[in-house]
Amino acid sequence: MRLKNVPYAKEKINNSIYVIKNPESFYGRFHSLFGNDKPIHLEIGTGKGDFIIGMALKHPNINFIGIEKYDSVLVRAIEKLEELNISNLLFIRMDALNIENIFHKEIDTLYLNFSDPWPKNRHTNRRLTSPLFLTRYENIFQNKCHVIQKTDNQDLFVFSLLSFNNMGYRFKALTFDLHNSQYVKDNIQTEYETKFVSKGMPIYYVDCEK
């Protein structure tokens, strides 16, 4: 994916009230940022924010945190959020590789939407549903490990299902065609999803926990 450079992105991110500047200092106590003890849901790779902003609007009794590592993408999500009155959504500019150093037993649900499939075999461990990452996630969850994934990549999806199964997850919901399934009624689309669906491409979806 080639990203369009946004010259003012870093400055805007650094000055935004919606961005957690020193997330490691809130290790194990992110509830304090929201001033309540409502569940915290986390999205890795929040992109331009359509999904997580939509979720925050739809579920005011849940706190949301979106992780994004690219400045030029995150700034677009911030700009959208600035036009709304939402108190249950914050962003972190970071790489998911560091996730277990930031969160500790406080996340209820993790969303993985249209993650990079890393198709080459030598990059298997970079996939966000690899056993390596699933192990990293275990210490971030407050109670049960709960992951919801959407992707347009069938190979990544099959790989993910095998990883989840081998790591002891059970499937609560699973479909190879989200938009022609019973699960679509509660679905909020990402930017990528909107584009893929308009082209008639199937969206793969799984909701699993252990």
Image: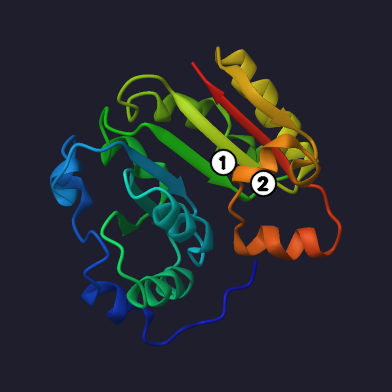
Give the answer, above or below, for where 171 lies relative to 196.
above
Q: Which mark is residue 112?
A: none
Q: Position of residue 73 (x, y in %)?
A: 48, 70
Residue 205 found in image quarter? top right
Q: Residue at 13% of width from left, 48% of height from top?
A: 35
Residue identified by numbered label 1: 126
Question: Callout 1: 10 Å neighbours few (<14), some, many (20+)?
Answer: some
Residue matched to label 2: 118
Seen at 25% across and 31% down, the residue is 104
Front residue of 119 and 77: 77
Residue 45 visible to the viewer: yes
Residue 94, quarter of picture: bottom left
* CA distance for labels 1 and 2: 7 Å
* Residue situated furthest right in the rendering: 200
* Callout 1: SS: helix
N-terminal of the pair, mark 1 or mark 2, is: 2
The amino acid pointed to by label 1 is Arg
Cβ atoms at labels 1 and 2 below 8 Å apart = yes
